[in-house]
Image (tube, rainbow, N blue to C red):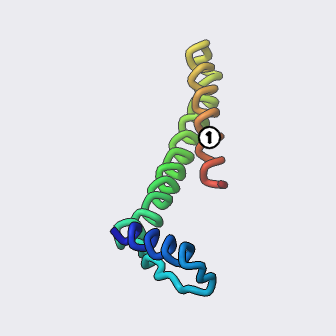
């Protein structure tokens, strides 16, 4: 309804030829508390998950690299590659 009154006042000012007429603008919307909470909570959760993922993947990577000498196999190689890819992804999220 506020939009309609703004458009109506603006149209009247133009039709009357009054270029100096002041038109009431709708009030500026304020950010609700819930949105401001989500603005800092979401990145915090993302950062926490990325840090936990970095730690977990580095532990898996180190354990599998050390165990590769004893239990070498193609499955270990695939898991090592996957944990390395996950580790790089988590570290890049933390850096960004």
Relative to 96, is 76 above or below?
above
What is the count of numbered marks? 1
Relative to 9, is 34 above or below?
above
Q: Nearer the viewer, residue 72 or 8?
A: 8
Quickly name the residue at label 1.
89
Image coords of residue 64 (percent x, y) = 58, 29
Q: Nearer the viewer, residue 76 or 46?
A: 46
Q: Residue furthest front?
A: 16
Q: Nearer the viewer, residue 39 or 95?
A: 39
Image coords of residue 81 (percent x, y) = 63, 26
**Which residue occupies 61% across, 40% down?**
87
**Which residue occupies 46% across, 82% down?**
24
Where's the C terminus, which quadrant? bottom right
Q: Nearer the viewer, residue 91 or 5?
A: 5
Image coords of residue 54 (percent x, y) = 56, 46
Image coords of residue 1 (percent x, y) = 33, 68
**Which residue occupies 54% across, 78% down?**
16
Relative to 15, is 92 above or below?
above
Q: Is residue 89 left or right of residue 50?
A: right
Q: Secondary structure at mark 1?
A: helix
Q: Residues within 10 Å of mark 1 (few under 14, many from 20)?
A: some
**Which residue occupies 65% across, 47% down?**
92
Q: Is residue 1 left or right of residue 6?
A: left
């Amino acid at each position: 309804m506020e939009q309609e009154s703004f458009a109506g006042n603006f149209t009247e000012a133009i039709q009357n030829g009054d270029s100096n007429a002041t038109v009431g603008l709708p009030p500026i919307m304020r950010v609700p508390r819930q949105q401001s909470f989500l603005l800092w909570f979401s990145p915090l959760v993302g950062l926490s998950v990325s840090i936990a993922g970095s730690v977990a993947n580095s532990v898996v990577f180190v354990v599998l690299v050390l165990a590769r000498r004893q239990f070498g196999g193609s499955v270990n190689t695939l898991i090592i590659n996957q944990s390395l890819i996950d580790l790089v992804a988590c570290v890049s999220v933390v850096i960004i």
